[in-house]
Amino acid sequence: MKNTSEDIFLWQQIKKGDITAFEKLYDIYADVLLTFASQYTNETSIAKDTIHDVFLDIYKYRSGLAQNVNVKSYLFKITQRNVLKKHKASKKMFSITSDYDSVILKELSFEDTLIEEENNTALNSKLAFAMQELTEKQRKALFYRFNEDKPYEEIASILDISIESCRTLIYRCLKELRKKL
């Protein structure tokens, strides 16, 4: 993306406080940036707010803007960063409840989210305690299979056992962990 002479001129005028140059830059890029921002979020309101915030910040902080900037590149980069930030902040926590006939999507309250996090923490500590009771070979097999995502053949080679023994070892480890949890 190259600077056009018009972009450079408008940028310099904006730094000086020229509102007409600011409006012209907005008119040139607002629609293109809105289309660009819409690639990162399905919510049109977030995309529009982002574009307005980008231009508001440019005018608000115009005196501190860098002199030699690739204007088009700058606008696209700052739009991308801001839309992703806004989109992430607007995401809400949801829980999927399965009924026999349907799947229900419900918004979680702060308390529900906190309880879910506490339950996950408790389950993780139980799992860590149960893992300590496994043998070194069992822990290695599980680590390679689930953390490293290695196939049974490779795990068997590393542990110097047959593939069938490897499958049996991992199956029995999982069975033991389920019992303890």
Image: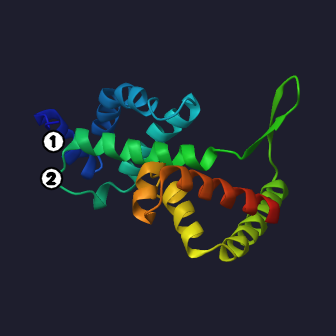
| In this rendering, position of residue 59 left or right of residue 118 | left
State the residue at coordinates (80%, 66%): 180
Depth check, front residue: 37 or 134: 134
Q: CA distance from mark 1 to mark 2?
A: 8 Å
- In the rendered image, is residue 181 in sight? no
What residue is at 30 percent from the left and 49 percent from the top?
17
Q: Position of residue 111 (x, y in %)?
A: 84, 58
Whole-percent x, y for residue 100 in the image: 88, 27
User: Label 2 crowding class (10 Å Cα cut-off): few <14, some 14-19, many 20+?
Assistant: few
* Residue 8 circle label: 1
Direction from residue 83 to residue 117 in the image, left or right: right
Going 19% across and 37% down the picture, which residue do you hit?
7
Q: Give the structural element (helix, strand or loop) at label 2.
A: loop
Label annotation for residue 21: none
Three-letter amino acid code at disc 1? Answer: Ile
Q: Residue furthest top?
A: 101
Decide: is 59 above or below 6: below
Which mark, by number, is residue 68?
2
Ranked by sequence position, the earlier of labels 1 and 2 is: 1
User: Residue 43: x and y, percent?
Assistant: 58, 31
The quarter of the rendered structure image containing the N terminus is: top left
Q: How far from the left and from the top, in percent, is residue 28?
A: 30, 28
* Left or right: residue 98 compared with residue 129: right
- For badge 2, the amino acid type reads Asn
SS of the residue under disc 1: helix
